[in-house]
Image (cartoon, helix red, strand yellow):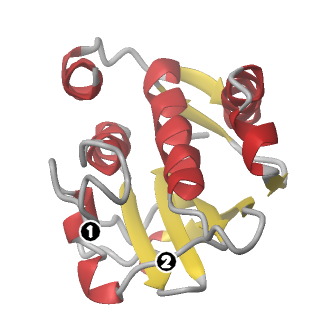
Amino acid sequence: DDLLAYSRVNGTDKIFERVDMNDILETVLYEMIQAQIIDEKKVKIKYAKLPDVQGIPFQLKQLFTNLIGNSLKYSDPSRPPVIDIRSVVVTGTDVPNARADINRKYNKISVTDNGMGFEQEYAEKIFSLFQRLHDKLTFSGTGIGLAICKKVVENHHGFITAKGVPGKGATFEIYLPVYI
């Protein structure tokens, strides 16, 4: 299923339209509530108003589904999960990627959790296909979810970064171009 999802990100028509990221997030949260994932873990999800972007709704839904799912999967069992989703507009000079257009503005969407976190040395590795930081017995999964996130963001001419602190949590920052 995960390989199929990854191939759909590569193979879907890249027809861009105006997408309200609030609608996408609400759809993802609704589906997780219906699946009893949110109640089961007693998750607290906080979010501020998100921007409209030019994008592919199906892919942007995959992005949020995988990022929130990752936060839940790697939550710290000793405390209830808290996920905070925020957005701000930044200039290209604020994007931590040499390929960013310094003359462009980007929507920076941050997804922060209070989960297990990770060593910063693995911040790039976690976006590679089939790469995992934990063995399959400890955590289920295929190592495809974050690779899907990276591919979705790249398909939208953006960038994604990860910051982790073991025992404290992780932050994923997505930079998507602002279109007027």
x, y (%) of residue 156? 38, 39
**Residue type of the residue flagged with mark 2:** Gly
Q: Which residue is drawn at 55% across and 86% down?
A: 167
Mark 1: give few (<14), some (14-19) or many (20+) Cα within 10 Å: few
Decide which of tag 1 and tag 2 comes sooner along the chain.
Answer: 2
Judge whether 135 appears above or below 169 on screen.
above
Q: In this view, does 44 lie to the left or right of 84?
A: right
Q: Residue at x 56, y 57 (%)?
A: 71
Which numbered marker is on residue 117? 2
Q: Which residue is drawn at 83% across and 48% down?
A: 49
**Residue type of the residue flagged with mark 1:** Leu
Residue 178 vs residue 40, the one in the foreground = 40
What's the CA distance linking mark 1 and mark 2?
11 Å
Judge whether 31 appears above or below 120 on screen.
above
x, y (%) of residue 128? 17, 56
Q: Residue at x 39, y 61 (%)?
A: 160
Q: In this view, does 150 lie to the left or right of 79?
A: left
x, y (%) of residue 89? 65, 63
Describe the element under mark 1 as helix, strand or loop. Answer: loop
The quarter of the picture where the N terminus appears is top left
Judge whether 20 appears above or below 74 on screen.
above
Residue 152 vs residue 30, the one in the foreground = 30
Instruction: Residue under label 1, please give it.
Output: 133
